[in-house]
Image: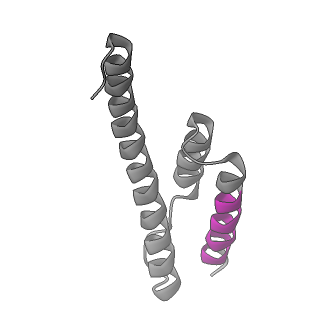
């Protein structure tokens, strides 16, 4: 256990940060999964609702700016999802 006041404070701060980042990563993953599921559904059934690419792109860009994921990782994911969105829109 921490012996000094500053060590106890760092533990409290780390716990808060860990909880915040965990929630943000979870919401990011949820947005990705929802987009992929919607795109797959739309490719199978043309009358299904189109996936919202701009929302996912925004979520990924915000995650990169906050340091949750690397900037290059966000760009790579956006690029791949954009290809999928174009497939859905061309169908």
Tell me the residue at 39%/50% (across/down): 27
Tell me the residue at 38%/45% (across/down): 22
Say which of 65 and 2 sits in front: 2
Tell me the residue at 38%/13% (across/down): 6
In the rendered view, does 12 fall on the left or right side of 51? left
- Counting the numbered discs, the total is 0
Q: Is residue 90 above or below residue 54?
A: below
In the rendered view, does 8 fall on the left or right side of 27? left
Say which of 16 and 44 sits in front: 16
| Image coords of residue 66 (percent x, y) | 56, 35
In the rendered view, does 81 fall on the left or right side of 51? right
Residue 42 within the segment the image draws in magenta: no
Q: Quadrant of residue 19?
A: top left
Say which of 90 and 15 sits in front: 15
Q: Is residue 55 above or below residue 85?
A: above
Q: Quadrant of residue 15?
A: top left
Q: Point out the residue furthest to the bottom here.
A: 44
Where is the N terminus found, in terms of image quarters? top left
| Image coords of residue 73 (percent x, y) | 67, 55
Q: Which residues are magenta?
A: 76-88
Residue 85 within the segment the image draws in magenta: yes
Q: Point out the residue furthest to the left here.
A: 1
């Amino acid at each position: 256990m921490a012996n000094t006041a500053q060590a106890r404070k760092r533990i409290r701060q780390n716990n808060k940060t860990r909880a915040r980042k965990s929630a943000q990563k979870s919401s990011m993953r949820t947005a990705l999964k929802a987009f992929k599921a919607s795109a797959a559904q739309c490719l199978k059934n043309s009358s299904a609702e189109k996936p919202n690419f701009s929302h996912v792109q925004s979520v990924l860009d915000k995650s990169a700016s906050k340091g949750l994921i690397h900037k290059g990782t966000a760009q790579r994911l956006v690029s791949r999802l954009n290809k999928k969105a174009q497939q859905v829109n061309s169908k």
